[in-house]
Amino acid sequence: MASRLESLCQNLQTVLGGRIAGINTAVGEVTIEVAAEHYIEVARILRDHPDLRFEQLIDLTGVDYSAWGDGAWKGLRFAAVCHLLSLSRNVRLRLRAFAPDDGFPVLPSLVQLWNSANWYEREAFDLYGILFEGHPDLRRILTDYGFVGHPFRKDFPISGHVEMRYDPEQRRVVYQPVTIEPREVTPRIIREENYGDAEHG
Amino acid sequence: MAEIRNYTINFGPQHPAAHGVLRLVLELDGEVIVRADPHIGLLHRATEKLAETRTWLQTVPYLDRLDYVSMMCNEHAYVMAVEKLLGVQVPIRAQYIRVMMDEVTRILNHLLNIGTHALDIGAMTMVLYTFREREDLMDVYEAVSGARLHAAYYRPGGVYRDLPDRMPQYEVNKFKNAETVRRLNESRQGSLLDFLEDFTNRFPAYVDEYETLLTDNRIWKQRTVGIGVVSPERALALGFTGPMLRGSGVEWDLRKKQPYEVYDRMEFDVPVGVNGDCYDRYLVRIEEMRQANHIVRQCIDWLRNDSAKGAGPVITDNHKVAPPPREKMKASMEELIHHFKLFTEGMHVPPGEAYAAIEHPKGEFGVYAISDGGNKPYRIKLRSPGFPHLAATDEMAKGHMIADATAIIGTIDLVLGDTDR
């Protein structure tokens, strides 16, 4: 297993070289980071190069890094993270590309390379508002018809903005502002390193 | 000549064959499907967003509610991702229990799939037979975890508790007389493993029964052979996994290729289809049930061995991850603090990201977890197998008759709780 990852890293270095912005191996998984302008080119090489041959796009997701580490994040906000699988070489790879503009995140679409990207990109667009350039049918997928906003962004409240109820006078379902109070039972905490170790009190 | 226009109909969201709340917009030319556009999200509960506001442990029960016919498999991928980030070792006995319960779940899932698929396309009897066997396995679930459906049995670091020594018994009531109760309780006299072993002895004959009903059934074959054909190349490009991919003839099973837990010690075969149609996928699922039954048997043999090999803890002794046993808590202040911190603040997972995938009955179920070191996940992405399968409906249904849409939805083993998350 370890040797397979090493040879994968070497292949990635030799084939992709300067196009990779970052490569790291952690918990037995290889992650490469590419700039948005190299994204589609790198994806094509990953799929077609005989030493790599990632036939399957297993997963593609948006990530909003704005709240990472309680404000410790300094980089770009939105990223698309792909999980690729090579059946012939039996390895996985994570490919991450950050959208260059935080206000209007755009990335090229991978639909032409892996057709499975179609719905994944629709989902990332729906939930994070990342626009995938070249996508044939970039509609919302999981949220309601006529939904406003991108619910998985970190600045979108968990309770949402509107709620739905049946209005007996108008005899139809209406939207109204949410009436529930946001409530956090367990606060989110990040402890310093060595917290709870005996010798650190 | 009269102008002929395509006709658009709504299949669902309240259609008995839509397996939940799927709205399929079908554009028809006569009875031929020109375009199928699935509208999903009617069961979207934002599990991934909810997970961001819950501690790592509190998220486990939400996973049951994704694919509500293979509950423990969902939990499995999640706890594996958390364990990967934490670097926790799972005791060997817990690994065997997980594999056994995964395979029980696989049988449960395939039974439901085959039963309802046959029901959808006209074979009423199947579902009655398969639900009979599901009932026994549901009892296994209940005996193990206390719940028939939403088990929350797997925990980061192991499983919640060891397998029970006795099975719950039926009692006489106004619906069941003493004779019925005696017959029902016959296999429930011993431990859970005895009950499950008895089931595995009976099960191959049941599968034969299903095969007599369907495999050579003329109507079943007319409805499934040559329907929804996917070539291996297309299956890969469309992101198919599990029986959908194997039905197309690609030999790929994570249990063999990237073994997790103790699957590398198990002996089983991976069935592969040839034509990539609904019928082949049905055959693959039938054979997978037989193989799952075989794996359950191997696990029972190992777990039953009460000597040094089979016995041992079922959850890690790292009390920052798993709670200490009750007895110790009563005597030791430190353990009490561990328990209190674990259930109020929750465990802290080191910063990083991990992707853990398992061979879910429906395909590859993956959990991509990002942690920033907090007591709650920063981001959880659930890779549900049904999502890319459903996305391919358009390609699979195009050119088929409208009645085949039901066969295609049935064969992709759709559970909307899983697709919509």
Image (cartoon, grey):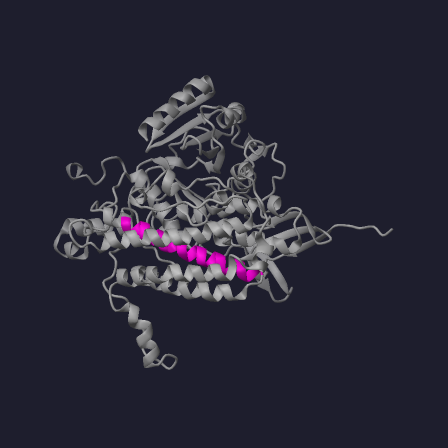
Task: Measuring from the top left, give residue B249's x and y in whole percent.
Answer: 50, 41
Left or right of A17 on screen, residue A111 = right
Q: In front here: B189 or B23?
A: B189
Name the residue at the right extreme.
B1
Is any atom of residue B110 visible in this view? Answer: yes
Q: In front here: B271 or B117?
A: B271
Q: Assess whether residue B60 is covered by the magenta stretch.
A: no
Q: Quadrant of residue B136?
A: bottom left
For the image shown, how many numbered marks are present on the structure?
0
Left or right of B2 on screen, residue B376 = left
Picture residue at 51% right of the left edge, 46% below the top:
B387
Q: Assess whether residue B113 is covered by the magenta stretch.
A: yes
Task: Measuring from the top left, give residue A22's x and y in whole percent.
Answer: 41, 23
Q: In front here: A74 or A36?
A: A36
Task: Measuring from the top left, give residue B330's x and y in whole percent.
Answer: 15, 57
Left or right of B177 on screen, residue B242 = right
The part of the chain drawn in magenta is B96-121
Picture residue at 48% right of the left edge, 26% below the top:
A46
Chief secondary structure of the magenta portion: helix
- Relative to residue B324, is residue B352 depicted above or below? above
Q: In front here: A38 or A100?
A: A38
Is any atom of residue B68 visible in this view? Answer: no
Task: Measuring from the top left, give residue B210's x and y in whole percent.
Answer: 47, 61
Picture residue at 51% right of the left edge, 39% below the top:
B239
